[in-house]
Image (cartoon, grey):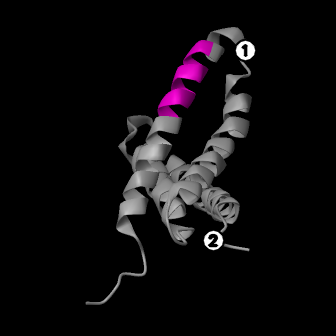
Amino acid sequence: MARSILQWKWIFVSILVFLAAQFALSLVFGFLGVVTLGIGFALFLIIKPVTFFAGGFVSGLLSRGITIVEPAIGAGTMTFLGGILDATWLLPRRISWVIGWSILAFVVALIGAFFGERAQGSVR
């Protein structure tokens, strides 16, 4: 029986980790939107990549074996599908933002997963 290069389980677990992080982030920004007096979007631009890194780190840390690409695929997929399903993003000029955020999510989650695997001891 051929072994899959990707561990699909960890892609789905990563998507769940990122969904939880997104939910927490939306709760925080729902509260901070009132408190920040209009700079909530600037905070979003800073905190969103932090959630990608943290989600990748947690997924990389919790998984057995080397699963660096799986959290990155999960982050990119979740970001892309979330952007496509959001009705405000369906405008043609905004599709580039969806693609850009998906690529950013993939790269930052990949870095986070590498450091998670490193903390686990799977990668030097």
User: Horizontal and vertical percent for residue 68?
Assistant: 57, 68
Which residue appears farthest toward the front when viewing the image? 121
Mark drawn on residue 122: 2
Which stretch did the figure color magenta? Answer: 22-31
Q: Which amino acid is tagged 2?
A: Ser
According to the picture, the residue beneath numbered tag 1 turns out to be 36
User: Horizontal and vertical percent for residue 60?
Assistant: 57, 59
User: Horizontal and vertical percent for residue 50?
Assistant: 68, 43
Contact? badges 1 and 2 (CB < 8 Å): no
Q: Quadrant of the C terminus?
A: bottom right
Q: How many marks?
A: 2
Q: Quadrant of the N terminus?
A: bottom left
Asked if one can make out residue 11 in the rendered structure from this viewpoint, the answer is yes
Residue sitting at x 46%, y 53%: 14
Label 1 or label 2, whichever lies nearer to me, is 2
Instruction: State which quadrant residue 72 falls in.
Output: bottom right
Crowding at label 2, few (<14), some or many (≥20) Cα neighbours within 10 Å?
A: some
Residue sitting at x 72%, y 30%: 43
**Left or right of residue 2, residue 51 in this image:** right
Of labels 1 and 2, earlier in sequence is 1
The vertical placement of 111 against 32, above or below, is: below
For this rendering, which residue is in front, 96 or 41?
A: 41
Q: Which amino acid is tagged 1?
A: Thr
Residue sitting at x 59%, y 56%: 61
* C-alpha span from label 1 to label 2: 41 Å
Element type at mark 1: loop
**Left or right of residue 52, residue 1 in this image:** left
Which residue appears farthest toward the bottom when viewing the image? 1
The vertical placement of 67 against 109, above or below, is: below
For this rendering, which residue is in front, 109 or 29?
A: 109
Residue sitting at x 53%, y 28%: 24
